[in-house]
Image: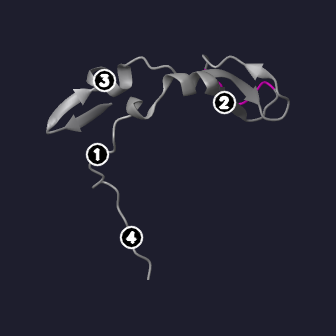
């Protein structure tokens, strides 16, 4: 997979957004029906019971670590298309 930026082709390994380690604050995955917990660091499709998995987060930890300055301000949004209905 390659990304093009200013006519320069970058591979995924060169894209800092994809390789920088970031905290996720995910504590576990939980079966939506049974409440069974499964590890968040493995790939899952469905719970062992065959139901969707819900992601559970450490919201207190995220609240202590993340602030408004953690995230960059939105830049040029010219890529957003708006349509008028009428």
The answer for how far apart the CA atoms under marks 2 and 4 are is 34 Å
Looking at the rendered structure, the secondary structure element under dot 2 is strand
The answer for how far apart the CA atoms under marks 4 and 1 are is 21 Å
- On the image, the x and y values in percent for residue 14 come to 26, 22
Q: Residue at x 28, y 45 (%)?
A: 75
Q: Is residue 4 above or below residue 85?
A: above
Query: Mark 4 or mark 1, which has the lower sequence index?
Result: 1
Mark 2 against mark 1, which lies toward the viewer? 1
Give the residue at mark 3. 16
Q: In this view, does 46 lie above or below 14?
A: below
Residue sticking out furthest to the right: 34
Which disc number belongs to residue 75? 1
Q: Is residue 21 magenta?
A: no
Query: Mark 2 or mark 1, which has the lower sequence index?
Result: 2
Q: Is residue 23 left or right of residue 20?
A: right
Q: Which residue is drawn at 71% across and 30% down?
A: 46
Q: Which residue is drawn at 34% across and 27% down?
A: 17
- On the image, the x and y values in percent for residue 2 come to 28, 32
Front residue of 4 and 19: 19
Give the residue at mark 4. 83
Q: Give the range drawn in magenta.
A: 43-48
Residue 13 sits in quarter? top left
Front residue of 11 and 6: 6
Which disc number belongs to residue 55? 2
Circles 4, 1 touching at the beta carbon (< 8 Å): no
The answer for how far apart the CA atoms under marks 4 and 3 are is 33 Å
- On the image, the x and y values in percent for residue 32 come to 78, 35
């Amino acid at each position: 997979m390659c990304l093009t930026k200013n006519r320069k082709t970058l591979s995924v390994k060169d894209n800092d957004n994809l390789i920088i380690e970031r905290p996720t604050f995910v504590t576990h995955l939980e079966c939506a029906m049974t409440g069974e917990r499964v590890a968040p660091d493995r790939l899952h499709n469905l719970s062992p019971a065959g139901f969707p998995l819900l992601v559970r987060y450490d919201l207190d930890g995220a609240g202590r670590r993340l602030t408004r300055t953690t995230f960059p301000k939105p830049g040029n949004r010219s890529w957003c298309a708006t349509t008028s209905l009428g």
